[in-house]
Structures are given as structure tokens and as C-alpha cells.
Amino acid sequence: MSTGGAIITAMPCRNVDHGDGRHAIVCGPPARARKCIVCGVSTKEPKLCDFPVGKGKTCDAPMCRACARHTDPDTDFCPRHDDFMKGRLKL
Ligand SMILES: [Zn+2]
Ligand SMILES: [Zn+2]
């Protein structure tokens, strides 16, 4: 009996965690890495700033997990917008 040798994974599949309990299996070439706007490290699953900038758009600044300022339940801000929001709350 043979084990069949190495398993060839031509199309790598990954489990992408959305961070809110949902997850998806994504197959195919890995997503193109984006650079964190804060520390410059490239990350394949960037957090995008959810700060609304009008017309239904969001800031969308890509950040690594460490730099994104997470707010429950499913919001991430870049440091600039997080500071802006905090400053506004105090006023
Ligand atoms: Zn970063
Ligand atoms: Zn932002």
C-alpha cells in the first residue's frame, strides 16, 4: 500500500477569517499584498478603514492587523480617523 506521495496543491485554498464569526474558503492565487499605511509592512489580508468619506465611500486605507484601530462590532479605523472620531466625541 502506498500513501501516494506528496499532495500537490496547485490551487492553494485558505480559510479567510472575517473576524466577526464568518469565514470563507478562498481558492486560487493569493490576494495581492497591500502595504499598511501606518508601518509600511505588506499584508495579504489588510484591514480597511471604515471611516465614511461621503457618497457611500469609506477611507479604505489598508492597514495590518496590528495598526488597525478596531471598534466593535466590525469597524476598523486608520489612526488618523480614529483620533478624529475620539476628538469629536470629546467636544
Ligand atoms: Zn501596520
Ligand atoms: Zn481612514
Image (cartoon, rainbow, N blue to C red):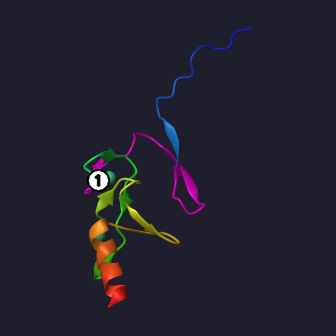
What residue is pinned by disc 1? 36
Above or below residue 80? Residue 31 is above
Question: Is residue 86 a member of the stretch shown in magenta?
Answer: no
Q: Is residue 25 left or right of residue 30?
A: right
Residue 43 coordinates in the image, percent (x, y): 35, 47
Would you call the spot at circle 1 few (<14 residues within 10 Å), some (14-19), or many (20 or more)?
many
Residue 18 coordinates in the image, percent (x, y): 51, 58
Above or below residue 20? Residue 24 is above
Residue closest to the far top: 1
Residue 46 coordinates in the image, percent (x, y): 37, 54
Residue closest to the far bottom: 91
Task: Tell me which corner region of the image, top left, top right, bottom left or bottom right, holds residue 47.
Answer: bottom left
Above or below residue 18? Residue 3 is above
| Residue at disc 1, CB closer than 8 Å to ligand 1 | yes
The magenta region covers: 16-38
In this orientation, does residue 22 appear? Answer: yes
In this orientation, does residue 58 appear? Answer: no
In this rendered view, identify the residue nearer to me: 11 or 50: 50
The three-letter code of the residue at mark 1 reads Cys
Residue 59 coordinates in the image, percent (x, y): 28, 71
Name the chief secondary structure element in magenta.
Answer: loop
Q: Is residue 82 left or right of residue 10?
A: left
Above or below residue 27? Residue 19 is below
Q: Residue at x 35, y 57 (%)?
A: 67
Quadrant housing the C terminus:
bottom left
Task: Tell me which corner region of the image, top left, top right, bottom left or bottom right, holds residue 32.
Answer: top left
Residue closest to the far front: 90
Q: Residue at x 34, y 80 (%)?
A: 85
Q: Residue at x 68, y 14 (%)?
A: 3
Tell me the SS state at disc 1: loop
